[in-house]
Structures are given as structure tokens and as C-alpha cells.
Amino acid sequence: MLPVVVVLAAALWQAAVAGQAVWVSGAAARAAARAAAVGADAKAAVRRALPGALERDLRVDTDDDGTAEVRIAVPLVVGGGRLTTVTAQARFAPQGG
């Protein structure tokens, strides 16, 4: 019975980590888009918006039209690998002249 409980607990924890990655990737994409819209460093804005554990394999792309795309690797709870990658996009119109 104990092995089943341990596997179930690990699966639930993994689901929580994946859910957090999905949730914060949207916030990080919005932070990157806001920073890019005012001419600031988009990657630095994303790093401030993310927990440290999700910064590994982080990728931030911005376009001239104000679009920002953030890709975050979802870490495995057991084994230290990567489960998948989560992608989020946001867009703010560039500011200024």
C-alpha cells in the first residue's frame, strides 16, 4: 500500500508543479510584453515574475509589434529532468515615438 501512496503523492505534486508553470507563464509573458512595450529588458522582467525553479531553460522572444513569447520548462519532481515545455504569449502596443 505504501508504494501506491508514494506514487500517488509524486503524481499530485507533479501536477501542482505543472499547473504553477502554466499559471506563471502567462504572467511572465505579460511582464515581458509590458517591458518590451516601454523599451525595457523583457528577459529581466520575466525573471522577476518567475520563481527560481522555473528559470531553467527559459526562453523569451519579443517582436517589434509588441508580442512576447515565453517558454518555460516544467521540471520533473523526481529525477531532475524536464516533463514538458509551456508556452505563453502576450502583446502590448509599443509606447513612445
Image (spheres, grey):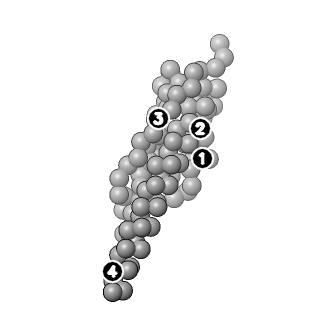
Instruction: State which quadrant residue 59 falls in.
Output: top left
Q: Secondary structure at mark 1?
A: helix
Amino acid carrying label 3: it is Gln
**Of the numbered discs in the image, which one, if any, rests on residue 89?**
3
Q: Which residue is mark 2?
A: 31
**Of the numbered discs in the image, which one, if any, rests on residue 4?**
4
Depth check: 28 or 2 in front? Answer: 2
Depth check: 58 or 49 in front? Answer: 49
Q: Report whether 56 appears left or right of 41.
A: left
Coordinates of residue 21 in the picture (x, y in percent): 47, 52
Observer-side mark, 1 or 4, equals 4
Amino acid carrying label 4: it is Val
Amino acid carrying label 1: it is Ala
In three-dimensional space, the C-alpha distance between marks 1 and 4, rounded to whole angstroms, equals: 36 Å
Depth check: 60 or 21 in front? Answer: 21
Circles 2, 1 touching at the beta carbon (< 8 Å) = yes
In three-dimensional space, the C-alpha distance between marks 3 and 4, rounded to whole angstroms, equals: 38 Å
**Of the numbered discs in the image, which one, if any, rests on residue 49?**
1
How many residues crowd mark 3 within 10 Å: few (<14), some (14–19), many (20+)?
Answer: many
Q: Secondary structure at mark 2?
A: helix
Q: Is residue 49 above or below residue 15?
A: above
Q: Is residue 80 above or below residue 34?
A: below
